[in-house]
Amino acid sequence: MTRFRIGTRKSTMALAQTEEIARRLQAAIPSLDIEIVKFETTGDSDQTSKLLTHGGKGGAFVAEIRRAMLDGRLHAAMHSLKDMPGNEETPGLVIAALLSRDPPGDVLVLRRGLSLDEFRKDGGRGFKIGTNAVRRAAYARRLFPQAELIHFRGAADTRIRKLDNGELQRLPDGGAVGPADALIMARSGLERVGLSDRASFDFAAADMLPAVGQGIVAVECPSLDWETRRILATIDDGAARSCADAEREVLWVLNGHCNSPIAGFATIDRDQMTLTASVLDEDGGRFIEAQRAGPADRPRELGRAVGLELLANGAAELIERSRPR
Ligand SMILES: NCc1[nH]cc(CCC(=O)O)c1CC(=O)O
């Protein structure tokens, strides 16, 4: 049998996620001969320009690796579900597996030597929080109204090194900001790069609603490659899929772009699903939130209802305002 080739970006986090896919596939199908194929992408080599300008890291990576699958160079590709565009479908490709969800929330990572009490005592006054996500910036402005939010990017492990070294973040216009005193990062990402001991504080979902799909690793493959789909079905997690269907339906209804200020998070309790979603203003001034519960086996219906409620409350205007031009 030919080797089963899975494509991935080369970052520490992406490799850890792909190795997890390989481990689960190997456990399900011991005879499978798996090869991990590493891709260098525009998103990784261009560390300075704002992600926004090329449609998000997802946008750049997704296009390149998808070509390889459609050309037959790969059987499948790893994605963070969070980074997959929610406002379009890719003809010829399908998300054939979603791994069981890792912790979905965000954490605060402080520069070494800075204590949480010190950081929090005056609403963050005098401190700089680095993040590239409109969603995180908007929630952070609410939680730490006195802190300064600065643009900060890079792979998870690189970002923490920059934080500890007090490095400035270069901006696309040639300027620089920083150094940052704190970062906001996904707990799952931090764990995957082996740095979970750096989490100073876990944000509750109610205080910082996770991004749609956060914590879920996705595996994509050509939709007509039935053999690959059968293989990937062995590691597909039903609960992750239901939550993903509900959360991504919100993106679909809102026609959200790659860096949309949209948050969405579903949980399942027995046969009930609860879905919360929000649309945020870049400066944290306006929040539109909606929450509904419904049968867990009808996730899209719930996503649609929540998405339409957000639209009825003015979501489209906030999303259009943040669209990259
Ligand atoms: N944009 C990069 C990215 N894509 C997915 C995750 C987190 C892990 C996940 O959601 O599975 C991260 C890092 C971060 O947001 O801190």
Image (cartoon, grey):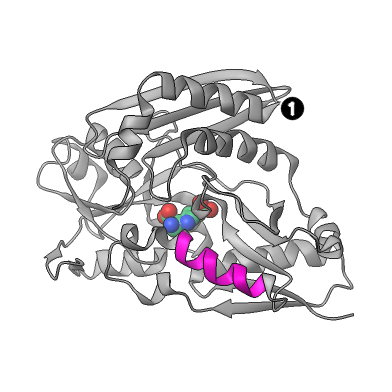
Considering depth in this image, is 324 or 80 the residue closer to the camera?
324
Residue under circle 1?
297
Considering depth in this image, is 36 or 59 the residue closer to the camera?
59
Helix, strand, or loop for circle 1? loop
Where residue 194 sits: x, y (%)?
A: 49, 64
Left or right: where 314 falls relative to 246: left
**Which of the 4 image quadrants contains residue 154?**
bottom left
Residue 190 visible in the snapshot? no
Q: Residue sitting at 72 percent across and 24 percent down?
A: 270
Q: Residue sitting at 54 percent across and 38 percent down?
A: 252
Q: Residue sitting at 47 percent across and 19 percent down?
A: 309
Left or right: where 291 falls relative to 271: left
Left or right: where 279 falls relative to 281: right
Quick one: label 1, few (<14), some, or many (20+) residues within 10 Å?
some
Where residue 42 sits: x, y (%)?
A: 42, 74
Left or right: where 158 falls relative to 222: left
Residue 61 counted in the magenta span? yes
Considering depth in this image, is 63 or 202 the residue closer to the camera?
63
Quadrant for the N terminus in the image: bottom right
Q: Residue sitting at 62 percent across and 46 percent down?
A: 101
**Which of the 4 image quadrants contains residue 29?**
bottom right
Q: Which residues are magenta?
A: 59-69
Q: Where 29 sits versus 10, above or below?
A: above
Q: Where 280 sits versus 151, above or below?
A: above
Secondary structure of the magenta portion, mostly?
helix
Where residue 77 sits: x, y (%)?
A: 65, 66
Tag 1: amino acid: Asp
